[in-house]
Image (cartoon, rainbow, N blue to C red):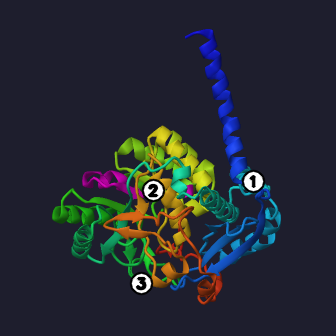
């Protein structure tokens, strides 16, 4: 290449950013700088006794706003207060384009960071800011995140039953609906089903707890036999999952994972509580049963070593619980580098806004593994037009700009939050001696 041609190329390259800046300036000519004009906190039961908390960020550009989820079923009013009294006055007047800067500032402005309440606040803000940016670009959010890496977002179905026969039948029914992935739970008593002693059964302290009592050894003995029966009936085509919900400890967790190995599970979820994650090293050494972890994680230092040391196969955090789209995209990239996958925890009491935030990260990431199924009553689709739809085991967004959702605030107000009895705690299980079992 001649020196003159080389310099022409360098000069042309240096002009590209300037040309792009000029194009942006031309499109926004005559418009004032974009700022956050108002912030609204919108709450609703969603038509099914949910405790949904949404953040609506309104800009000074006519009709331009974004929505994010601050979902927290168990400390709902703490999140509402944090949004209204602490985030709103801090956020008004700021530039919504500076998502990364606002994320870092919001994460640090409480001084003590990494906790669930502030994570909900940061997540709601972050999702709403990405919604604004993609709407202004007039494209679905996944386009700004790199475009589609797949055609749809696969979801797993929730199946199971009180008997092994019903569990096998429910897997077959799910296959007929188009699902390939099914989480199979079993027995009575809630999570940990298959490991409970009935009320008053077993040796109990005098005058002590007499309700359903979880027993690790019973669980470790029962569940593998259930999956042995299910596999004998449905074969190894369906991709089966199971959620332990952190009910096991130490060597029992290792033994359970080893005993589940012959049944080729897609993953076993949350063998251990966050307090016991060091045991995943022993689990990995003992067997090849894939592990999904992170539903109750709120601090990066909980999942970072598990991913980077390749001790788990799926990162199971909830997008609105770990910092929103910005953090979820970083986690997905980290997973890609270390051979892990994402399986965002989006079921249960979660809402359509966070479901769509997860969807846009999923469909644009090569680290995606699976997403949890969640469906909503018809009135929720009216409250939030553009709510995602699941068809034959795949989640689809609306294709509209941004997250793809609108919100009917008047209709949402007709379904207010109901009274939260006893403060709305998560219901924990107990052992035969009355001890609380970690969820």
Is residue 263 a member of the stretch shown in magenta? yes
Q: How crowded is mark 1: few (under 14 residues within 10 Å), some or many (20 or more)?
A: few
Position in image of residue 303 (x %, y %)? 55, 49
Cα distance in 3D space between marks 2 and 1? 43 Å
Position in image of residue 382 (x %, y %)? 51, 82
Tag 3's secondary structure? loop
Q: Image height check: is 214 above or below 417?
A: above
Q: Which sits in the foreground, 337 or 89?
A: 89
Q: Which image quarter is the N terminus in?
A: top right
Does residue 416 appear left or right of residue 140 in this picture? Answer: right
- Label annotation for residue 343: 2
- Label annotation for residue 199: 3
Cα distance in 3D space between marks 2 and 3? 35 Å
Q: Do the residues labelled 2 and 1 touch (CB within 8 Å)?
A: no
Is residue 74 a member of the stretch shown in magenta? no
Cα distance in 3D space between marks 1 and 3? 71 Å
**Which of the 4 image quadrants contains residue 268?**
bottom left
Q: Image height check: is 134 above or below 11?
A: below
- Label annotation for residue 29: 1
Q: Mark 2 or 3, which is nearer the eye?
A: 2
Does residue 196 appear left or right of residue 147 in this picture? Answer: left
Q: Mark 1 or 3, which is nearer the eye?
A: 1
């Amino acid at each position: 290449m001649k020196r003159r041609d080389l310099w022409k190329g360098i000069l042309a390259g240096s002009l590209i950013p300037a040309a792009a800046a000029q194009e942006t300036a031309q499109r926004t000519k005559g418009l004032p700088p974009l700022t956050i004009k108002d912030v609204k906190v919108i709450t609703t039961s969603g038509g099914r006794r949910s405790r949904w908390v949404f953040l609506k960020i309104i800009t000074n550009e006519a009709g331009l706003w974004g929505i994010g989820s601050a979902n927290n079923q168990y400390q709902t009013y703490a999140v509402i207060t944090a949004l209204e009294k602490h985030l709103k006055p801090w956020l008004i007047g700021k530039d919504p384009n500076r998502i990364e800067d606002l994320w870092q500032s919001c994460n640090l402005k409480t001084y003590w960071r990494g906790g669930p309440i502030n994570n909900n606040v940061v997540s709601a803000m972050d999702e709403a800011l990405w919604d604004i940016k993609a709407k202004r670009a007039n494209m679905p959010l996944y386009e700004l995140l790199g475009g589609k890496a797949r055609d749809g977002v696969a979801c797993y179905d929730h199946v199971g039953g009180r008997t092994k026969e019903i569990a096998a039948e429910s897997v077959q029914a799910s296959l007929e609906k188009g699902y390939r992935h099914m989480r199979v739970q079993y027995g009575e008593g809630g999570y940990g089903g298959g490991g409970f002693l009935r009320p008053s059964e077993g040796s109990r302290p005098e005058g002590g707890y007499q309700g359903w009592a979880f027993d690790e050894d019973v669980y470790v003995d029962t569940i593998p036999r259930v999956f042995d029966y299910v596999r004998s009936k449905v074969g190894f085509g369906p991709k089966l999952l199971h959620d332990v919900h952190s009910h096991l400890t130490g060597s029992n967790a290792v033994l359970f994972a080893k005993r589940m190995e012959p049944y080729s599970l897609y993953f076993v979820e949350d063998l251990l509580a966050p307090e016991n994650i060091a045991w995943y090293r022993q689990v990995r050494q003992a067997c090849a049963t894939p592990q999904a972890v992170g539903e109750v994680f709120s601090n990066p230092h909980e999942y970072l070593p598990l991913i980077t040391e390749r001790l788990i196969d799926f990162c199971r955090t909830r997008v609105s619980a770990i910092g929103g789209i910005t953090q979820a995209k970083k986690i997905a990239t980290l997973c890609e580098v270390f051979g892990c996958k994402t399986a965002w925890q989006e079921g249960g009491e979660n809402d359509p806004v966070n479901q769509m935030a997860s969807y846009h990260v999923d469909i644009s990431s090569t680290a995606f593994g699976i997403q949890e199924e969640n469906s909503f009553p018809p009135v929720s689709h009216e409250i939030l037009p553009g709510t995602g739809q699941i068809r034959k085991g795949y989640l689809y967004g609306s294709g509209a700009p941004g997250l793809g959702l609108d919100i009917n605030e008047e209709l949402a107000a007709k379904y207010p939050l109901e009274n939260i009895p006893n403060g709305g705690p998560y219901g924990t299980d107990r052992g035969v001696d009355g001890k609380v079992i970690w969820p």
